[in-house]
Every structure is written in structure tokens, then in C-alpha cells.
Image: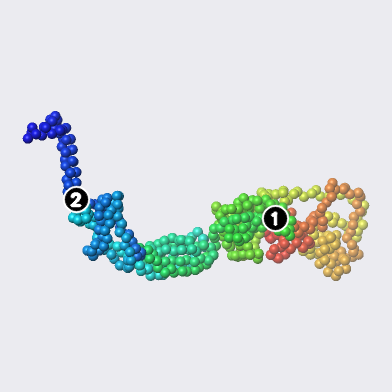
Amino acid sequence: MTEFIRKIPGFKSGSLWKGTVASAVYLFTLVIILVILFPGAPTLALEKIDPTNKSSVTLSGKTLSNKPVYLFKDNQQVQTITADSKGQFYFPLNNLTDGNYSYEVKACNSDKQDKCATENILIVVDQTPPNQPLIALPATLPNDSSDKITITGTAEPNTKIVAQLNQDQAEEATVNSNGEFTLETNLAVGGNTISVKSLDSAGNESEAVISSLNFNPKTYIAKVTRVVDGDTIKLETGESLRYIGIDSPETVDPRKPVQCYGKEASAKNKELVEGKTVKLEKDVSETDKYGRLLRYVWLDGTLINEFLVREGYTQSSSYPPDIKYQDRFIEAQRLAREENKGLWGDTCNPPSPEPIKTTTQTQPIQSAQPVTQTPGAYTCNCSKSCTQISSCDEAYYQLNTCGCSARDGDQDGVPCESLCSGGTSTPTQTTQTQPVQPTQPTTQNSGAYTCNCSKTCPQMSSCAEAQYQLNTCGCKARDADKDGIACDSDCQ
């Protein structure tokens, strides 16, 4: 026997390692021959089919290439197919209705079905939709559009809740085993339509439950498409918006000339917010008399209304009842004025011209009483009573120059008769030597001021001038609240 083995290739040398390799090769070859001569059952794998609501499905799987595959139902063969070159096969199943379907699949070595691999599969067909869910909306809506609301409800256990907000897909939720669910979603500013329905594992949808609600939060997000001027903007919605609590110099009103620092205010507002998404905050009023939204405008934590006042581009202007931040605006304006910024600087408030000087009088005053002031020293103020007027000369000045007719109650041409009675019916005049001529013509009228209703409050040199423009010149725009005090934000 030993002699016979040594005659086999691989064993002739008597080397142990060569003999081991030769044994492995011969054994592997023997296995291959046995598999060819006596094949076993082929492998078989079926793809899983989830519950479905469809009446037609495809049962698919994989086995050895070109092997016959059989489909049985209730022990009856219903279909036969041959796997392709990759071993894949498909059985179409049609005309299915609600119910559970059990199938047996066999992959065999030959048509004799003597050596086969077998797998069972259950197909669930569910075409019945779940019940309509019930929902409850929150009783109180948030004040900020960035905050979500929570919707609670009940539905069939283990179904999925699908919601739409104004035709857009909202967040989804899963119904727990007790049939309860919660759903969170944001709301759009204005009208909202919320649609909620259940979806089961087979893909069946319930009838939708639809609710409507109006959402008008105190603060919300909006995009600025255009800046109109220093205190007015246009939104992506097409709405115009007026900043609360401030007033910018006019640049676009066809009835008024472009006012000082108006273009600068518009340019700065454009730099700050145009094309950007801002947060809008409502106070009390929704719109002004022109239909513009009234809002505070925030950008990256900065209150733009206040910023424009603080940097001197606009002035504080109170319009009750929208006064939430008015104290902040007034303080911002005070600081801007102290620092001579923008409206409060030399651009809109040039230095006053030098007063006109006269030579010393050489002739005695021709009057029944001494003169204490020259007319140029008086300021128009029709609110002064006769007891507050310093002299008869000032009384005539207030009557004739300023038009304060209340100083002449009996209309005899003599004002404040308690001051000017006793033979003096006209203001006293002084005799002067040649006066010193001013280096340039004066533009002042009625004392130190000139009527100019286009001047804004920031352009007034003092509260006295503001009151002059209101009482003497009739510039009613300087008294927006009609309380008799001009330029309230500066003169109260």
C-alpha cells in the first residue's frame, strides 16, 4: 500500500509538506465531483412585502441561476417560473382584496422537484382607511411668530399623523398605543388653514379634519423690499410700514420741499434694512390714517427706530397710544442733540448771523416816558399778557408787528392801555445818529424769526421760535396734538 501511495503525484518525494498539499487538492476535487454527480437543494431568499392597500403586488426573490421556481397557495401550485441568469425571479399577484394571503415558494434543482428549498411568506392587503382624527387647537396663541403652537388629538393607535399648513407640509407625529398624539407647527401671520389626517402602515389615508384660525402676533418676521424715506418702508407682502415714535425730514411729499437731512435719513435707513429680513413689533395701533402698518423694526437685536433717533437722522415724535419705547426715544434724542449729530449739527442749524449794531444815540428821546428797549430786541409772543409786557414800546410791537390783536381789546389802536394811556398813543421813537450799516442784508422778520412753515422741529433754533411759527405764522403742523404747544418732544 505504501508503495502504491508513493507512485501518486505529490507523494513520490516522501516530503511531508508536499504530501499535505497534494491531499488537500485531491480532497477538493473529490467534493466538486460529488456535487456535480449528486447536487443538493438550491439556496432561496424572498423579498419582504409590507402591508399594502394595493390590489396588485409582485413577489420576488433570488436562487441559483436558471433553476425552476414554484408558487403554491393552499397546497396548490399556481405559478411556475425559471430564475434568470442572475438567479432572480418574480411572481405577479393581481386582483387582491382586503385580507391575509399565505404563499409557499419552492426553488428546485430540476423539474422533478426532488431537491428543493422552500420559503413561506404572508402578504397583508389592507384597503380600509383609518378613522378621521380629532384635534384641539390651543386656546391662546403666541405673541411671537417664531414660537410654535401645539395641537393635541386622538386617532387610531400606531398610525401616522400628517398635517398641512396653508397647503405646505407641516411636521409629522405618531399616534401612541393609547390613540393620542401631539403636533407642533409654526403659524403664518394672518389667516391659517390647518389640515390633519391619519395614515396607516398600508398607506390608507383618513378623511382630513380642517380648522382655520387667524394669527396676528405682536412680533413677526418680514422682508423689506424697498425703503421709501427715513421712517417708511415697503414689505414683501406689498404693505407700507411707518416706524412708530419717530419723524424723519420729508423727501417724497410733493406738497413740501426736501427738508434738511432728509436724503441722509433715507440713505441710512436703506443701508440698514433694505432687502433684509427684520422682526416687526406692534404696539397698540394696527395702522395709521393712511393705512400704513405701525411697527417697531428690529434687526439683529437693534431697535432701528431708536438707532435713527440716536444718530440724529430722525427725531422723536410721540403719537399716543403707541408709546411703549417713547422714553428710550426721548433719551436717544437728548444724547444726539448734546453731541450735535445729524439734524442737530451745523448742517441744519448754521450759526446765527451777527446782530446789527448801532451808534450811540446823541439826541434826547422825544417821548413822554423813557425808552428801555429798541424794537429789534423784542420777540413775537401773542401768548404774553399785558402784565408780562415790559414796556409800552413792546406792547405796540406785539400789536403792530406781530399782529397780536388781543392786546387792543377796544380796537382803538392803543395796546395795553394800562401801560400806554396818559397821552401816549404811539410808540416812542428815538433820534439816532447815522447807524452802522450791516455787512450783509438781514433776512430776519418780526424780530429774530422769519415765517417758514416748511421748517421742521429739529430745525427750530429754540422753543420760542417754534411757538412763533405756530401762533404768528399759523404753521399748525408744528402742533400735531393741538394742545397749543409747538414741537412737544422738544418744548414740554
Mark 1 or mark 2: name the one nearer the start of the chain: 2
Residue under the point 18% across and 55% down? 114
At label 1, counting other C-alpha atoms closer than 10 Å, the crowd grade (few under 14, some 14-19, many 20 or more) is many
Quarter that holds the C terminus: bottom right
Residue 109 location (% of width, % of height): 21, 52
**Residue in front for this viewpoint, 47 or 464:** 47
Pick out the residue farthest to the top.
13
SS for dot 2: loop
Q: Check if mark 1's residue and mark 2's residue have beta carbons within 8 Å.
A: no
> Which quadrant of the view contains residue 227?
bottom right
SS for dot 1: loop
Residue under the point 22% across and 63% down? 75
Label disc, if present, on residue 387 of the rendered structure: none
Quarter that holds the N terminus: top left
Q: Is residue 11 above or below residue 317?
A: above
Residue under the point 54% across and 58% down? 221
The amino acid sitting under disc 2 is Gly
The amino acid sitting under disc 1 is Thr
Pick out the residue farthest to the left.
1
Residue 322 location (% of width, % of height): 61, 63
**Residue in front for this viewpoint, 303 or 263:** 263
Image position of 47 (left or right of 348): left
**Residue picked out by circle 2:** 40
Q: Is residue 177 visible?
A: no
At label 2, counting other C-alpha atoms closer than 10 Å, the crowd grade (few under 14, some 14-19, many 20 or more) is some
**Residue in front for this viewpoint, 251 or 45:** 45
Residue 290 location (% of width, % of height): 65, 64
**Residue picked out by circle 1:** 251
Residue 26 location (% of width, % of height): 16, 38
Image position of 123 (left or right of 354): left
Residue under the point 54% across and 65% down? 190
